[in-house]
Image: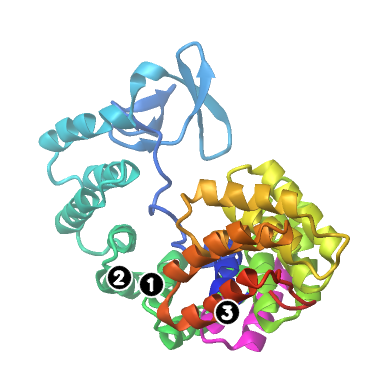
Amino acid sequence: MIQRLNSRLLFLLASLTLVCVCQSNLFAQNAPQFIARKDIKSGERLLAQAGDLIDAAESGNGQLTLTDPEGKAIPIDRNQVAGLEEAIGVLDRLIEKEPKETRLHSARANVWAARGDFEKAIEDATKAIDVSDGKQARLFVNRGVFHSSVGKIDLAIADYVKATHIDPSMHSAYRNLTSAYIAQKEYDKAIEVCNGVLEVDGRNPDHYIQRGVAYRHMEDWDKAVADFTQALELDQDNLAALGSRGFVFYLKGDHASAVKDFDRIVQLQPNDPMAYNNRGYNRYLAGDFRNALSDYNKAVELLPTYATAWQNKAWLLATCPDDAVRNGAQAIAAAQKACDLRKSKVASDLKALAAAYAEHNDFEMAAKHQQEVVGLVEADQKEAETAVLKDYRNKKPFRTSKGSP
């Protein structure tokens, strides 16, 4: 399979590393479940002020359970809080009474964000800054996250930089700043930020992971692996570091090492379909075809809508150099599943389907679907895909070799 089409397999593997690149929090405060309608107390102790975001658990009988700072579960009445659908109205009324209360504007911004309206979240985050003393770093981090969410990365960077100036010890601001620089492909700046943070917080694996991601984007594989390895020395079961290092091993062609990292993820998360698919694909590239097939089967068992795993399974069954592994009928079924899931709009799904029909000796259908591939791929891929089409018309099936996608 030609390199550009093979890149579709990178997307899945890469998605496992995205946890390293994303904002340190979706919102500066966790997505709220409820808003306090009024002050909530336990005896004389104030648990939450009116308008505070509350992360509480349903406990039945119209009650919620709120965990206090000491970790004690405190039951509260459901009528004391409002859900997200009512929260804006509650906050509107509170802000009308206290228009200069920073906390309330910030809370409303987080509610808008939780509801997916980031433009309104930005408006309220800006109001929170305007009515504050301008010295609360978290307010700028909040707004920076919202700016990032609508693709305004330059504005997000400005907010994160401002936050670091206000509070040089606020590590979440540095993490978000690094993420923003990576999103802008300003990898040198991302590395510079990480270097500075590591000087004062060298025991935090997140900083090594972020720097490793920047090195990966720069294709400096060895430095990326070194950073992910350092993160794992600090936290041996860090999933982001394992997935990121496994991905870089894959990019380096060190599939045996990649298998080990994804194998560890499978041990830690035995119901993670992506981990099985990623391990399976590296096993396939290492020539361990039977175990690769087993991994693909497990991936689609755990997640039947996992189109890429269906495609990988189909490609293995259709093109494997091991005669005992190939199965045209099963390959057709798997490839058709991938095509159905993605509406036959992905060239590599159709390529797998064409190869499956060729393995099943139905070269007419193989040529039909390969012609669709030729119509979908970019101009620089058409020559190679047309050559495959010619093979099918000459009744020649597609075969891969060990170590080749």
**Res 35 → quadrant:** top left
Q: Which numbered disc flags the more N-terminal residue, 1 or 3?
A: 1
Q: Which quadrant of the rendered structure holds the C terminus? A: bottom right
Q: Are marks 3 and 2 in contact (CB under 8 Å)?
A: no
Q: Which numbered disc flags the more N-terminal residue, 3 or 2?
A: 2
For mark 2, give the secondary structure: helix
Amino acid carrying label 1: it is: Ala
Q: Nearer the viewer, residue 160 or 364?
A: 364
Which residue corresponds to mark 2? 153
Disc tally is 3
Residue 394: give x, y in percent of width and height. 65, 73
Q: In the rendered structure, does residue 126 fall within the stretch colored magenta? A: no
397 relative to 56, above or below: below
Gap in angstroms between the C-alphas marked 3 and 2 = 43 Å
Residue 378: give x, y in percent of width and height. 42, 76
Q: Which residues are magenta?
A: 211-235
Q: Which numbered disc flags the more N-terminal residue, 1 or 2?
A: 2
**Res 397 → quadrant:** bottom right
Front label number (3 vs 2)? 3
Amino acid carrying label 2: it is: Ile
Which residue corresponds to mark 3? 387
Q: Nearer the viewer, residue 274 or 136?
A: 274
Left or right: where 181 falls relative to 395: left
Q: Nearer the viewer, residue 105 or 368?
A: 368
Amino acid carrying label 3: it is: Ala
Q: Secondary structure of the magenta portion, mostly?
A: helix
Left or right: where 320 falls relative to 198: right
Residue ID at (24%, 42%):
104
Color scheme of the displayed model: rainbow
Q: Are marks 1 and 2 in contact (CB under 8 Å)?
A: yes
